[in-house]
Image (spheres, rainbow, N blue to C red):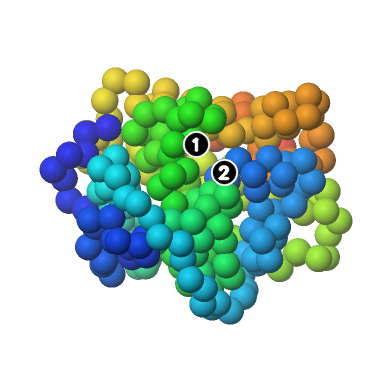
Amino acid sequence: MRWIGRKESGNIEDRRSGGGGLAIGGGLTAIIALIFSVLTGQNPLELIGMSQQGGGHQEQREAPLSTSRENDEAAHFVAVVLGDTEDVWDSLFTASGQTYKKPTLVLFSNSVSSACGSASSSTGPFYCPGDEKVYIDLSFYDDLKNRFNAPGDFAMAYVVAHEVGHHIQNLLGTSGKVDQLRGRLSKEEYNKLSVRLELQADFLAGVWAHHAQQTKNILEEGDIEEALGAANAIGDDKLQKEAQGYVVPDAFTHGTSAQRIRWFKKGYQTGDIKQGDTFSTTNL
């Protein structure tokens, strides 16, 4: 991805100890919580006592981080990606007569407090609708490359764009409608809605990539393949197969590898947000 020297978003809140060299401005899941969630069918945020819509702010001490040059570079990279998402979604919202409210991206190390509760790095990147912030521990990108075998900077961009996709769903009221059904449906039925929500976030990530390429020519050879590799690596079926040797579809919460790839590609190819109704279609 072409990003060096380009504008960075100012909506960055750096909570890493030592600051990581990035000035303070303005989720996909990682190994432990992610694998356990696909085995049990639970939302990974629930595993750490978090709700998608609620929860009060909790103070806690964060462990110190020894920042590296690579980690600092990743911080500047995600700031550029966030800036690109701001430009794309601001333009699309304006075109539809709406105002885009930009999210804040929080960089943290080891653990963090949010309006949705407390989380650890093992939760992976996540979006909290309660404070409209995306939370990322940059060590996740080492997991993406080394554990999930999904290297490349655009794999990282896909993760950020996916979480911003959840912010779009929050602004449009989609995630709120789904959350209202929590506790009113069986776990299996709610998991099906969760899959549709996650696949729509993948679609929205593709929509972002489409428009960012059209307006800024950000893509280099192999970038889309990197995003598809990340989508493939974190499909529920693939993770379940690796963890236990078999697949339990009723426990899916994010969609299969094929589904995640399909919806990202659809968003990227069409660039049309109206094509992303994952809730009505019978063909996921």
Where does the image place residue 150, in percent across and percent down from the top left? Answer: 47, 28
Q: Quadrant of residue 117?
A: bottom right
Where does the image place residue 43, in percent across and percent down from the top left? Answer: 69, 54
Q: Quadrant of residue 232?
A: top right
Q: Which disc, if any, is residue 245?
A: none
The C terminus is located in which quarter? top right
Residue farthest to the left, as pictured: 5
Where does the image place residue 56, in percent across and percent down from the top left? Answer: 58, 79
Within 10 Å of disc 2 (Cα), the crowding (few <14, some 14-19, many 20+) is: many
The three-letter code of the residue at mark 1 reads Asp
Whether 257 is drawn above or below 267: the answer is above
Q: Which disc, if any, is residue 30?
A: 2
**Residue at coordinates 82% horizontally, 40% vertically from top-left?**
250
Tag 2 and tag 1, C-beta contact below 8 Å: yes
Q: Is residue 108 left or right of residue 195?
A: left
Within 10 Å of disc 1 (Cα), the crowding (few <14, some 14-19, many 20+) is: some
**Relative depth, front residue between 114 and 203:** 114
Disc 1: which residue = 143
Q: Secondary structure at mark 1?
A: helix
